[in-house]
Image (tube, grey):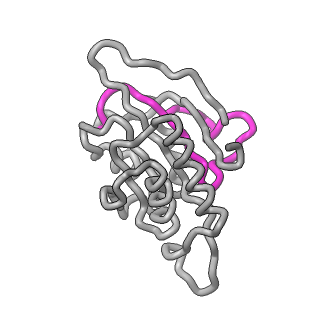
Amino acid sequence: MYVYTLLTGQGNIMMRELFILRHGKADTPEGLADFDRPLKKRGREDSKWIGRWLHDRKLLPDYVLSSPAIRALQTAQRVCKQLDFDLEAIEYEHGIYEAYPDTLVSVLKKCPHSAQRVLLVGHNPGLEGLIVKLTGYSEPLPDDASRLSPAAMVQLVFEGDWDQLTEGCAKWVALVRPENL
């Protein structure tokens, strides 16, 4: 796990946290559409570990957004079970599936003002592109990481409200990979 210095907000500007989680390892059954692919056993276990990591650090989301694709839906549900987050409160947004970074930013800009901490569950390559866009990194992940692996999660922070998300506005806090837990 990588941990970077968390920058705190100053004045009356609210600090927001965004957790960007790639769905867990998915199965590829023959004849099944991509949208309908379920998690493998490893994907189910990894999702549970990410949920435990969040729970143990008391990083409970106020709002959870997920792609409605089966593997993302199952990932979001498994994480939320570990957090005692109401599964009925998960928002499934069709725009997250196969989304480009600009689309993901548009989806995030609609998060409620009351949400200080948001968990976004989706797919690559859109999530990596979103991380690059929001942080200004020229590479999606630091140093040894070549890509956002299944069930890997990045924690970002930014000052302001969700509708103020812009390119380069966020700071990198952590990269969490299940294999490192």
> Quarter holding the N terminus?
top right
In the displayed structure, would residue 89 be above or below residue 168?
below
| Picture quarter with the C terminus | top right
161 or 50: nearer the viewer: 50
Q: For the point 56% across and 83% down, which residue is it?
A: 32
Return the residue found at the far right: 144
| Magenta-drawn stretch contains 146 | yes
Instruction: Give the residue at x 44% y 48%.
Output: 83
Left or right, 20 with respect to 159, comes to right
Image coordinates of residue 50 in percent, x first then y, are 56, 48
**Residue 118 lies in what quarter of the image?**
top left
| Count of residue discs | 0
153 to 91, vertically: above or below: above
| Of the pair 49 and 125, the residue shown nearer to us | 49
Q: Nearer the viewer, residue 99 or 5?
A: 5
Left or right side of 62 for 148: right
Prevalent SS, magenta region: loop
Q: Position of residue 123 (x, y in %)?
A: 52, 58
The quadrant in which residue 61 appears is top left
Q: Residue 140: image x %, image y %?
A: 61, 41
Magenta residues span: 135-162
Residue 6, relative to residue 162: is it above or below?
A: above
Question: Residue reaching furthest top?
Answer: 11
Residue visible at 56% across and 55% down in the picture: 48
Q: Residue placed farthest to the left in the image?
A: 113
Coordinates of residue 117 in the picture (x, y in percent)? 38, 38
Residue depicted at 41% across the width and 66% down the height: 68
